[in-house]
Image (cartoon, rainbow, N blue to C red):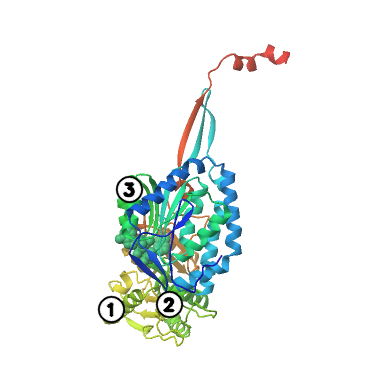
Amino acid sequence: MALTQSKVTDCKLLIGGKWVASESKEFVNVTNPSLGEVIARTPMCGRAEVNQAVEAAHHAFAEWSETPVVERARLMFRFKNLLDANYEDIARTVSREHGKTFAEAKASVQRGIEVVEFACGIPSLMMGESLENIARNVDCETQRHPLGVCAGITPFNFPAMVPLWMYPLALTCGNTFILKPSEKVPLASIQIAELLIEAGVPKGVFNIVHGGKEAVDALLEHPLVKAVSFVGSTPIAKYIYEKGTANGKRVQSAGGAKNHIIIMPDADMNQTRQALQASAFGCAGERCMAGSLAIPVGEAGDILMPQLAESTKAMKVGRTDIDGTPDMGPVITADHMNRVKSLIDKGAKEGAELLVDGRDVKVSDAPNGYFVGPTIFDHAKPQMSIVQEEIFGPVLSVVRVKTIEDAIQLGKDCPYGNGAVIFTNSGRAAREFKRHFNAGMIGINVGVPASMAWFPFTGWNASFFGDLHIQGREGVLFYTQQKMIMTRWFSGPAKDKFHDPVWKTKS
Ligand code: NAD
């Protein structure tokens, strides 16, 4: 089921069960970031094409929402088997279009498959509640109903996983769906859609459109789109939330992040160093849960930093589109590489100590790839741009503080609130941290505390706009609306009969 990857293809739209070429004349190049070579082109759809997808999804909703929930679950079981069978092929596409190492790509596909596994349990997840006799002869129940057409708009950094956060649950809840993947990485979404078709998804239940702002605006403005799930940068997340809700839609909108890793002097330093390095530089730092800001407390910095600098300098940066085992691949585009490098320049100018400098990294068999080596700034100060901004590259800033209270205060001053981690052996420090740190996903001796499928992805502050988060039960609540049904059967002969001692004796 792997795409033909030898020539540049123009990505097609999936509308009403058919792959169709876009009529757009505008395209964005999809590149293999390891080589800087164009491998496909993404059409930038206009409103008319998006509207066709919405109409197809709306048309399919009538039948799909009446399909018994167990049949919807069975579609997911078949989909899950096909994902398992094609797991490595999908991961290869992710490595090729995004630049993740093969190990990282496989792990990300696995996280996506886990959402499908969760969605297989939809008959239980969608159950309502009931209570008898809430008043005399009155019973009450709640049911969960699908919303209609839902849309998902996704970022470049997890081409397979983030779309899978959304549509398996949306579909099994009885909705139809339109995915607008990132124009930078559409290939994994297309490959996975082929599997969903093979699993038997009815025509129009799942659709794909491509593009940027114009396509997204068309989704946000279309009256038949009932709910929008978004994952991407904070300014766009806020825009999607505001515009979507102003147009009467449900919106869950996850944004950017700056994730703090606090290291107490009593932490297991070797384990901490490994976890911190993986958190900061895994996926070339292009993760919304990347630990991009380390905060050693007291003497922790003096113990940790020399070892961390040494092991970081030993990391192997390389191409990820061929077999091999680099520790880190490229970043997504030439523009992004230049942005990351210019933020490193800025950090150095602002006076942070550049302990490991990744700006001049060279990959001999891929001279045109978009590589930035792992970079560490020590003795950064809270007001510096490398501490304030989401760099979204392999750059770790280190702010040393005296007490855990100072570390917690840094979190309070941060506008984001996705994840935060403490490394310690002290129960008291861990408890203080988990109660008071200003972020929605907390790790204790865990480098990347990203929620798995069964739990919601609970970003706070400027890392999330909306009420119900993506994944877990909150995902089910987001994609369904409740109906409360109150029933009264008047007391009459039948009731009298059951309570009539003479009738009881006779029967
Ligand atoms: P992005 O915001 O540039 O793009 C995300 C999506 O929005 C894409 O599909 C894109 O086509 C669309 N888009 C871009 N500009 C738009 C506009 N003006 N109007 C409407 N739509 C627009 O994000 P990105 O660079 O693809 O992804 C990286 C960002 O995503 C980082 O900030 C990262 O932290 C964030 N992210 C967050 C989470 C989370 O769960 N909080 C997860 C993954 C990534």
- Picture residue at 50% right of the left edge, 51% below the top: 169
Residue on which the image places disc 1: 346
Residue on which the image places disc 2: 330
Local packing at callout 1 (Cα closer than 10 Å; few below 14, some 14-19, many 20+) is some
- Asked if marks 3 and 2 touch (Cβ < 8 Å), the reply is no
In whole angstroms, how far apart are the C-alphas of marks 3 and 2? 37 Å
- Asked if marks 1 and 2 touch (Cβ < 8 Å), the reply is no
Q: Which mark is residue 437?
A: none
Q: Is residue 238 left or right of residue 206?
A: left
Quarter residue 492 falls in: top right
In the rendered image, residue 196, in percent from the top left (x then y), is placed at: 54, 56
Give, as a three-letter code, the residue at label 2.
Pro
- Asked if marks 3 and 1 touch (Cβ < 8 Å), the reply is no
Helix, strand or loop at disc 1? helix
Give, as a three-letter code, the residue at label 3.
Thr
- Residue 313 visible within the image: yes
